[in-house]
Image (cartoon, rainbow, N blue to C red):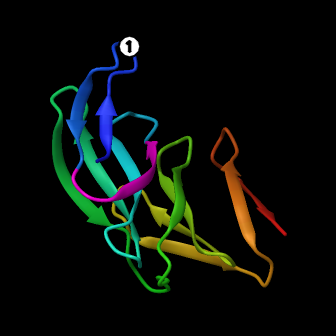
């Protein structure tokens, strides 16, 4: 069961329902993005949380044209909190608007993507592929 715990005390703040993996906090600390692994397919989702009160307020699926059947691995927020990136399959990187969950665009190539990182100013996304 996924948990949100206090980094200072180790005490559980809240349990998050579902089979979720690869959490990443938004820079403002008000949202989490996870890989939703409720089934084999998986799907990225934004989970809005109130870390202090432990209340899960909403789950917003990240959907739109071009979704892929293998789920979205390693979803991450940009440092400015405006974009979420994930690689939904080995050869595609997809970006979403972090506020609305709307698909922005995707990058595809024949090589296999295996990691990515935003620049500190959120202007660039470095993508490693083999």
Q: What residue is at 30 percent from the left and 39 percent from the top?
A: 3
Q: How many marks?
A: 1
Q: Where residue 94 sits in the image (x, y, percent)?
A: 57, 71
Find out whether residue 21 is within the magenta segment. yes
Image side of residue 78 versus residue 47, left or right: right
Image side of residue 37 versus residue 66, left or right: left
Image side of residue 56 versus residue 108, left or right: left
Is the stretch drawn in magenta largely helix, strand or loop? strand
Q: Quadrant of residue 119?
A: top right
Question: In front here: 103 or 13?
Answer: 13
Quadrant occupied by the C terminus: bottom right
Question: In front here: 28 or 72?
Answer: 72
Write down the region rendered in magenta.
17-25
Q: Where residue 64 sits in the image (x, y, percent)?
A: 40, 80
What residue would you read off at disc 1?
Answer: 8
In the image, residue 7 above or below residue 100: above
In the image, residue 65 above or below residue 75: below
Identify the element where label 1 is drawn.
Answer: loop
Q: Where residue 16 sits in the image (x, y, percent)?
A: 24, 47
Task: Identify the residue at the far right of this view.
Answer: 130
Q: What residue is at 34 percent from the left and 19 percent from the top?
A: 10
Local packing at callout 1 (Cα closer than 10 Å; few below 14, some 14-19, many 20+) is few
Q: What residue is at 33 percent from the left and 13 percent from the top?
A: 9
In the image, residue 88 above or below residue 57: below
Image side of residue 1 versus residue 32, left or right: left
Find out whether residue 93 is within the magenta segment. no
Q: What residue is at 47 percent from the left and 73 percent from the top?
A: 71
Q: Where residue 69 sits in the image (x, y, percent)?
A: 47, 84
């Amino acid at each position: 069961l996924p948990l949100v715990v206090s980094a200072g005390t180790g005490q559980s703040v809240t349990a998050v329902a579902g089979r979720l993996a690869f959490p990443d906090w938004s820079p403002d600390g008000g949202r989490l993005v996870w890989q939703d692994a409720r089934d084999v397919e998986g799907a990225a989702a934004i989970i809005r949380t109130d870390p202090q009160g432990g209340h899960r307020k909403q789950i917003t699926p990240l959907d739109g044209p071009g979704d892929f059947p293998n789920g979205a691995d390693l979803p991450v927020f940009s440092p400015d909190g405006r974009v979420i990136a994930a690689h939904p399959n080995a050869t595609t990187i997809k970006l979403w608007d972090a506020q609305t969950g709307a698909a922005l665009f995707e990058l595809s190539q024949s090589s296999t993507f295996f990691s990515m990182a935003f620049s500190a100013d959120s202007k660039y996304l470095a993508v490693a592929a083999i």
